[in-house]
Amino acid sequence: MNRKIKTRKEIGKIVSKLRKENKKIVTCNGAFDLLHIGHIKFLQEAKEQGDILIVGLNSDSSIKRYKDKKRPILSEKYRAEMLAALGCVDFVTIFSEKDPRPLLRIIKPDVHVNGIEYGEECIESKVVKKYGGRLHLVPMFKDFSTTNLIKKILRVYKE
């Protein structure tokens, strides 16, 4: 397993150590299925918000519950490895809940980054603000989403 991929328990210990070092902790979360340029730009902007970027990755079972029974395309193991390979990502942790709030209660990020399409009142908002954190919203990278990529692949290979 990649040294950047951590269990929830490990993340809790890491966060405690980072707080003692006065590091600004940034979180974001998502499926990150079929990693694309929109994801990369999002993660780079997230990293710019602080010292340490922790990515909460939806497990395969979580994605099936909140997105689509046919997803994810890539398993959580491979998605975690891809994220961990990026220089802007410091740690990756997989969560199996439908949403990241339980994980955010452990991390208590200084900044939580989300897509602008989820807005200031996203489900993470109250938890992040409860612990003194703030939200940073990132605009979608034009026309890029895993869903759009899947549609394009199907359209191109249908012929």
Image (tube, rainbow, N blue to C red):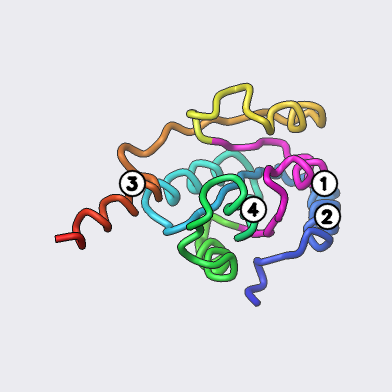
Alpha carbon distance from label 1 to label 3: 33 Å
138, above or below 63, in the image: above
120 vs 158, nearest the viewer = 158
Compared across the picture, whether 109 is left or right of 1 comes to: right
The stretch of residues the image draws in magenta is 90-114
Q: Which residue corresponds to mark 2?
A: 12
* Residue at x 39% of width, y 45% of height: 145
- Label 4, label 3: how far apart the Cα atoms are: 20 Å
Q: Amino acid at mark 2?
A: Gly
Closer to the chain start, of discs 2 and 3, is 2
56 horizontally vs 128: left or right = left
Q: Which mark is residue 148?
A: 3
Label 4 crowding class (10 Å Cα cut-off): few <14, some 14-19, many 20+?
Answer: many
- According to the picture, the residue beneath numbered tag 4 turns out to be 62
| Residue drawn at the location 59% of the way across and 39% of the way down | 49
**Label 4 SS:** helix
Foreground label between 1 and 4: 4
Question: Is 7 left or right of 118, judged from the image as shown?
Answer: right
Which amino acid does the dot numbered 3 rest on? Asn
**Disc with the residue nearer the chain's start (4 vs 2):** 2
Residue 41 badge? none
Q: Which mark is residue 106?
A: 1
Please state which of the two labelled residues, at mark 2 or mark 3, is closer to the viewer: 3
In this rendering, which labeled residue sits more in front, label 4 or label 2? 4
Sequence order check, earlier mark of 1 and 3: 1
User: Residue lying furthest left in this view?
Assistant: 159
